[in-house]
Image: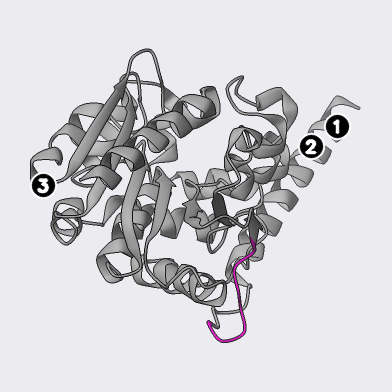
């Protein structure tokens, strides 16, 4: 009986893995004309802001604390390509493709008329810088939280390998195989304490293709020094937790000299998920940043 049970478990395990693999590679290719990102608008105020989540995240990441915002805001929350409830094609998932999909939504909702702000977390922080670099006339300022700045795969593996086995695998090519088995580990038992249930649930909606290619093409391969130099004169607020293991704060500090109009907020005892821990604090920093820059 024990042998039969073990064989059954192995077959079920392999079945889940094969399904996960096929779910990624058999998806249709990306069609920018027919595929539109999932998004949500909140508020109708004159202050327009676009919000971009991090890797494996969704637009739900930003919903905590929004009840505290004044009526002066109009927010555009977007599920990135391959994540949340957005399409998950078998595609490149490089910087250009991600930005193109975001730009389509921004134009559709009229956030491209100038004077808007864009805020991103982690992966979304990189896309935020890239978006402003492509369309400086659309945005008056930007805010980035937990910006990951690495010089390649080895630099990531060296840093994360010291933190935990899981972190090391998550930035290694082997992780794409782990990603095949979402249904087995994306359960409440594995949920980190600092991630709310609804956000953790959405973290399982990506495919191994959307995760791994985005990690490889955007987070690892993007030259952030070059990307940042395109927006060096833009007003930028950088918010970073001093205990951020996923995006070491010293790597972000190395970028600060590039900017001519930057404010760097170091948050003690904060990790990668600064916003989830204290959304009121983040919104207060943004409000203060905007007020100061309005006086300049």
Q: Which residue is drawn at 36% across and 48% down?
A: 125
Q: In this view, which residue lies farthest toward the bottom?
A: 33
Task: Kindly tell me whether residue 273 is visible in this rendering.
Answer: no
Residue 206 sits inside the magenta stretch:
no
Instruction: Tell me which secondary structure the magenta stretch mostly adopts.
Output: loop
Magenta region, residue range: 32-39
Q: What residue is drawn where x is 54% and y is 78%?
A: 30
Numbered badge on residue 260: 3
Q: What element carries label 3?
A: loop
The numbered disc on residue 5 is 1
Locate residue 242, reporting x and y percent.
30, 20
Kindly identify which residue carries mark 2.
9
Residue 201, x across and y down, in percent: 70, 40
Q: Tags 2 and 3 in contact by the CB under 8 Å rule? A: no
What crowding class fits label 2: few (fewer than 14 Cα within 10 Å), some (14-19), or many (20 or more)? Answer: few
In this view, 42 is above or below 172:
below
Q: Is residue 25 visible?
A: yes
Secondary structure at numbered mark 1: helix
Q: In this view, does 123 lie to the left or right of 194?
A: left
Q: Does 280 sit above or below residue 205?
A: above
**Dots 1, 2 in contact, CB < 8 A:** yes
What residue lies at 62% left-to-right and 57% top-to-bottom? 44
Name the outermost residue toward the right. 1
Is 39 left or right of 281, judged from the image as shown?
right
- Quadrant hosting residue 31: bottom right
Residue 149 vs residue 99, the one in the foreground: 99
How far is the residue under mark 3 from the one under mark 1? 64 Å
**Closer to viewer: mark 2 or mark 3:** 3
Q: Residues within 10 Å of mark 3 (few under 14, many from 20)?
A: few
Mark-to-mark CA distance, 2 and 3: 58 Å
Quarter of the figure with residue 38: bottom right
Where residue 101 appears, x then y in whole percent? 49, 72
């Amino acid at each position: 009986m024990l042998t039969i049970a073990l064989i059954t478990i192995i077959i079920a395990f392999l079945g889940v893995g094969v399904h996960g693999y096929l779910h990624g590679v058999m998806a249709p290719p990306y069609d920018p004309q027919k595929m539109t990102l999932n998004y949500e608008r909140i508020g109708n105020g004159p202050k327009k802001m676009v919000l971009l989540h991090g890797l494996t995240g969704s637009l739900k990441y930003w919903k905590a604390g929004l009840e505290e915002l004044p009526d002066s805001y109009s927010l555009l929350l977007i599920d990135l390509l391959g994540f949340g409830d957005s399409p998950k094609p078998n595609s490149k998932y490089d910087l250009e493709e991600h930005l193109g999909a975001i730009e389509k939504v921004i134009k559709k909702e009229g956030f491209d008329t100038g004077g808007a702000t864009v805020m991103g977390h982690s992966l979304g922080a990189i896309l935020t810088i890239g978006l402003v670099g492509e369309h400086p006339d659309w945005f008056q300022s930007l805010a980035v939280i937990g910006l990951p700045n690495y010089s390649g795969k080895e630099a990531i593996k060296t840093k994360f390998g010291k933190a935990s086995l899981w972190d090391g695998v998550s930035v290694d090519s082997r992780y794409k195989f782990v990603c095949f088995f979402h249904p087995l580990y994306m359960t409440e038992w594995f949920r980190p304490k600092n991630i709310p249930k609804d956000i953790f649930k959405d973290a399982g909606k990506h495919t191994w293709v959307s995760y791994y290619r985005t990690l490889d093409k955007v987070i690892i391969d993007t030259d952030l020094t070059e990307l940042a130099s395109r927006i060096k004169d833009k007003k930028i607020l950088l918010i970073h937790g001093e205990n951020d293991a996923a995006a070491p704060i010293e790597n972000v500090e190395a970028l600060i000299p590039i900017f001519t109009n930057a404010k760097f907020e170091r948050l003690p005892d904060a990790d990668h998920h600064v916003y989830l821990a204290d959304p009121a604090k983040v919104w207060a920093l943004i409000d203060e940043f905007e007020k100061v820059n309005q006086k300049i």
